[in-house]
Amino acid sequence: MFDFFYGSDSEQYQFYRVPQVLFTDDRFKSISCEAKLLYGFLLDRTSLSKKSKWVDADGKTYVFYKQENAQESLNIGKDKAVKIFVELENIGLIIRKKQGQGKPTKIYVMNFSKPVSKSNTKVLQRIKS
């Protein structure tokens, strides 16, 4: 059993932020709760990437987050982690860009509230290829 929160007790902890729209908007109803939570983890990493200056030539921020990290954070197996990343990719919330030669995969965490503009369509195609 655990004790109650008093006053500002809850302010001493760090929290992952998962956008409410992922639970309320029909566009995201098809993805699992694990995928929504993983997206929150990836969003959290984007602030670290900004500080680390992990941006591509177009100024787009990317993160590094291995499937093994997801397995550990979510307490899931490899197959489930693969499935969750694919869910996020299929709905367009992330784009993974392999770098090859043992380098980690770049993950572009897409802005859930902003559809791709026509001017960014070419950039998006270049990242995906």
Image (cartoon, rainbow, N blue to C red):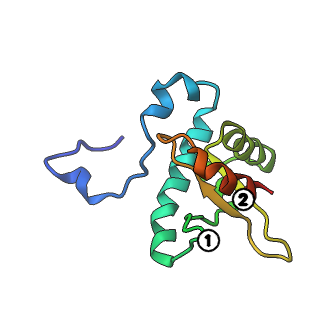
Residue 127 numbered tag: 2
The quadrant holding residue 3 is: top left
Q: Residue at x 49, y 25 (%)?
A: 25
Q: Quadrant of the C terminus?
A: bottom right
Look at mark 1 in the image and give the residue it sits on. Answer: 56
Q: Indicate the position of residue 126 as horizontal and vertical percent values.
A: 74, 59
Q: Residue at x 60, y 64 (%)?
A: 63
The quadrant holding residue 79 is: top right
Q: Can residue 22 be seen in the rendering of this structure?
A: yes
Circle 2: element type: helix
Q: Quadrant of the N terminus?
A: top left
Whole-number angstrom distance, CA of label 2 to CA of label 1: 10 Å
Q: How many numbered marks appear?
A: 2
Is 15 on the left-hand or right-hand side of 46?
left
Q: Residues within 10 Å of mark 1 (few under 14, many from 20)?
A: few
Q: Can residue 71 be seen in the rendering of this structure?
A: no
- Type of amino acid at the residue the image marks with label 1: Asp
Q: Residue at x 63, y 31 (%)?
A: 31
> Of callouts 2 and 1, which one flags the residue occurring earlier in the amino acid sequence?
1
Residue with the most extreme right position: 101
Q: Indicate the position of residue 82 as horizontal and vertical percent values.
A: 77, 47
Nearer to the camera, 92 or 38: 92
